[in-house]
Amino acid sequence: MGITSRMVPTEDASARKREIEEKLKQEQETLSFIRENMEKSDQLTKGMVSILSSFESRLMQLENSIIPVHKQTENLQRLQENVDKTLSCMDHVISYYHVAKDTDRIIREGPTGRLDEYLACIAKIQKAVEYFQDNNPDSPELNTVKARFEKGKELLEAEFRSLLTRYSKPVPPILILDAITVDEELEVQEDVVLEHLPEAVLQDIICIAGWLVEYGRNQDFMNVYFQIRSNQLDRSIKGLKDHFRKNSASSGILYSPAVPTKRKDTPTKKAPKRPGKDDVLDIEIDSYIHCITAFVKLAQSEYVLLAEIIPEHHQKKTFDSLIQEALDNLMLEGDNIVSAARRAIMRHDYSAVLTIFPILRHLKMNKSEFDTTLQGTAASTKNKLPTLITSMETIGAKALEEFADSIKNDPDKEYNMPKDGTVHELTSNAILFLQQLLDFHETAGAMLASQETSSSASSYTSEFNKRLLSSYICKVLGNLQLNLLSKSKVYEDSALSAIFLHNNYNYILKSLEKSELIQLVTVTQKKAESSYRELIEQQIQMYQRSWLKVTEHLADRNMPIFQPGTKLKDKERQVIKDKFKGFNDGLEELCKIQKGWAIPDKEQRDFIRQAQRRVVSDAYRAFLHRCANISFTKNPEKYHKYRPEEVEEMIEKLFDTSA
């Protein structure tokens, strides 16, 4: 039992030893395998190193061989590129030598109908010129292409002129009238566009102008432009004037752009004719007003066109030149109107100045638009309209002043006095003049104000101008009243003198009231209306005194005192006979004379007749009543010729030449 116990540990130790020895053996085998592999690896490494060293050596040899070849190849490529570039440049240069020949046909045939192709051709020539100038300035080819370029430019300039000349036409008068006529029925006015050139033509002209500025170094085309367009502008206005005169003369239609019209074919109401004014002058005035309006409209449209063609920094100057001819013609026509008015004033035909008023009013109404249109033009151009306005205001004010003096100094010629005591020609002319002045009251007031030098006139307000015109009208009326009073003394019959003054004063008052002149008069003379009524009443009373020599025979003075049934003495009977005879003769004489006198105003005529009929009839009836029971003659019908009703009928026929 004990022996067995000692043997077990020994066996375990042997097994453990064997196990260790096996592991050791395995480890040795592994180590031996590793060592063998290491040796193989070293051999492989040495082989690889040897191969790599050999490869490196070969690469170095290859590199040493290839680098020179590569460099040589690069040089060859560079040489090839240079050759290609040289050949290309040679081709390009050679092409410049052929430009003149290649472009000959196109340049010779000109740009008409093929502007783009032509400009491309010119561009080739221009590049050839630049090449030879830079590279061979002494070559004959330079002169050739230069000449060809100048020829091309010359033909472009000719094409510019040709297109403008061919397609620039005067604007038709009807189109101008459409453009300047205001339609009251339209809330928004249609802006009539005046197209001066077809769009395609315009684009060609713009293209040529652009080329001439940029490459042609040429400004002559601007002169060509303004000359051609200036001529068309002037022709457009003249065409309108001719059209207007022809149509106005044949139809009697007068247009007035100074006031709105419903349509261009709607005649405006003519102003009352002034003394001596004829239709031809009417047409001339309206024609001139139309042309002024047309000029502004056409000039504005010309500037719009010009702005598309002419370089910006040349536009104002070119526009200034373009409008000169038409503007000068209008100003000359205006000056002629002023001169005609001046000559008329020298002939004492002051009514001729009325031609200036509608024109002056229109010029002043359109001055701001005129100024805007001429903005940027020379001072001499801008001053033309203000100068004309000043001339018109000066001659107009002179005419007004001399007219007032002429009313005051019109001579009292007996043969010039109306035999029937009606309204004098001086009165009707003066009132007609003032009435027509009322149509232009603002213009007339400003005209008078323009001649004022006082400090109060510095502002020239509308109210100030109104007071000036009121004072002027009152001055004319005052002068007229003094002259009428003087003229009335030409009549030997004081009754006719009274009728004359009555008719003229009444005519003045009624005319003032009808024409609204009275409102203007009362600005400075508050009691003007009542003053005229007093004058009229005074003349009626003066006239009525003429009947005293008739009615005085009917008075009680010298009438015999008698008792009914008492026989009158011869002397007393004669007194009664004389009274009847005096009344009859006076009545017949006055009725015969005064029947040929005139009172044009029916209301006044009826009033004066009725008043006189009542006075005479009442006195006559009273006289007949007193003589009713008196036996003063054996032939009473000889003295008692008229019944009261017959006397009234006779008086009812006063102031009636047809009776």
Image (spheres, rainbow, N blue to C red):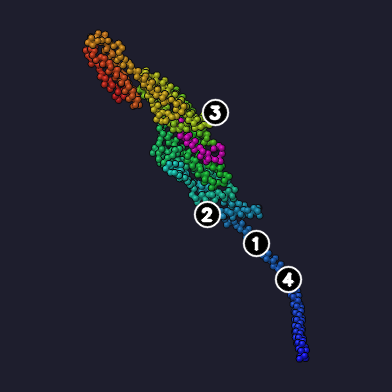
Residue with the mark numbered 2: 114
Q: Magenta part mainly helix, strand or loop?
A: helix
Magenta-highlighted residues: 353-382
Q: Earlier in the sequence, mark 2 or mark 1?
A: 1
Query: Can residue 488 be seen at all in this image of the molecule?
Result: yes
Image spot of residue 54 (x, y percent): 75, 76
Report if residue 317 lies within the magenta region.
Answer: no
Name the element at disc 4.
helix
Structural distance between the alpha carbons of marks 2 and 1 = 35 Å
Instruction: Identify the residue at image location x=51%, y=39%.
Output: 369
Name the one closer to the observer, 412 or 86.
412
Q: Amino acid at mark 2?
A: Arg
Name the element at disc 2.
loop
| Local crowd size for mark 1, using a 10 Å CA cut-off: few (<14), some (14–19), many (≥20) | few
Q: Nearer the viewer, mark 4 or mark 2?
A: 4
The answer to whether the residues at label 1 and label 4 have Cβ atoms under 8 Å apart is no
Residue with the mark numbered 3: 455
Residue with the mark numbered 4: 63
Name the element at disc 1.
helix
